[in-house]
Amino acid sequence: MVSADGRSRRERRPGAHVSTLTGVTIDYRLPGALTDLDAVPSGLLEGLGTEPVDICAPVHALIIQPGDAEARGFPEHRLAENQIRPAAEVIARLQGLDSRSLAEFREPLLRVVGTCRHFAVLACALLRYRGIAARVRCGFATYFEHDRAVDHWIVEYRVADNRRWVRLDPEILGQKVVGNPDDLADGQFLSGCEAWMAYRRGAIDASRFGVHGTANWGPAEIRGNVVKDLAALNKVEMLPWDEWGRMTEAYDGETGPDYDSLLDEIADACASEDATAVASIYEHADLRVPDELVR
């Protein structure tokens, strides 16, 4: 869950699943720019399991939410760790705090400050490191607050002989927030694209969808998560408050039917499970993440 950390989004604006399109390849077994662990010393990755749940199991003890870190008296410079994008940089910070393998349990002070996005991206990076098809999803969880769907990021993976994507919440794995964090049931998490489709057909109350601890609730939050979900499906897993294209206008209620129609196209592409369609629409000038944000 993306906790409020004293600075709102508005203040910080600034098996294989393979497809090829005009030189763009989506292979969820391989890392993207933000999940590449080639530079990570192999010793840090020793002891990780080989099955998806075992691989993801240590992640809940590697990241600490900003609110929890602040309550424990983390210094200001440590709180800024939630701005890190690449998984390899998260691991480098972890190494600086404790040089042991990531598989070793860490006390809170030895964890990196981050949001649910960081839990999901790190888990995804570790799964891809093991050659397992995995991808991050940006959307909304229904198990944190009663009758509300809270802005959240998870990871999903697919084994070679199973066509179903298994949704796993690495932040709460091993906890009692929900009974099945290793295999979330339908409706427990809605991706941004799924939430948008439900909103457009009148199946949900958009005012119940938003960001924990903030006033940011409603259709604008769903619009933002559609675009972030699309980027994540293209292996570009941005920070929850990153904005590009027309996202800022959408959050401010300054877009109209043309933009909503574009979001419909995104949602249709994501629902189709056609990687070519997912890669194709991501090339739209209003949707592709600028290179300077990824670097």
Image (cartoon, grey):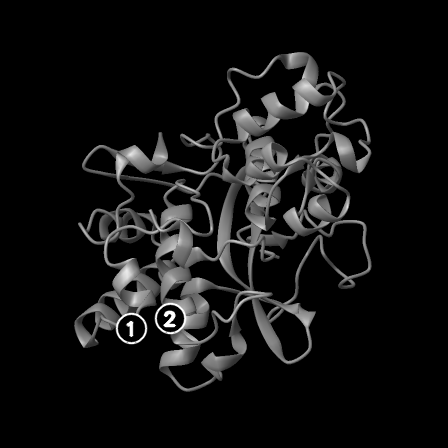
Question: Which tag, 2 or 1, sits closer to the chain's start?
Answer: 2
**Amino acid at the residue labelled 2:** Ala
Residue 109 x %, y %: 77, 33
Measured along the vertical axis of the image, is residue 40 above or below residue 274?
A: above
Binning the other alpha carbons within 10 Å of mark 1 as few (below 14), some (14 to 19) or many (20 upward) gives few
Instruction: Rate crowding at label 2 as few (under 14), some (14 to 19) or many (20 or more) other CA atoms within 10 Å.
Output: many
Tally the numbered discs. 2
Q: Residue at x 74, y 20 (%)?
A: 98
Give residue 253's mark: 1
Direction from residue 104 to residue 191 in the image, left or right? left
Q: Are marks 2 and 1 in contact (CB under 8 Å)?
A: yes
Which residue lies at the image location 35% right of the left edge and 57% below the top edge?
227
Vertical order, 266 against 254 (above or below): above
Whole-Å distance between the Cαs marked 2 and 1?
Answer: 7 Å
Label 1's element?
loop
Quarter residue 264 falls in? bottom left
Report the residue marked by disc 2.
220
Of residues 194 and 33, the one nearer the viewer is 33
Q: Residue furthest bottom?
A: 202
What element does badge 2 sit on?
helix
Q: Is residue 144 left or right of residue 47?
A: left
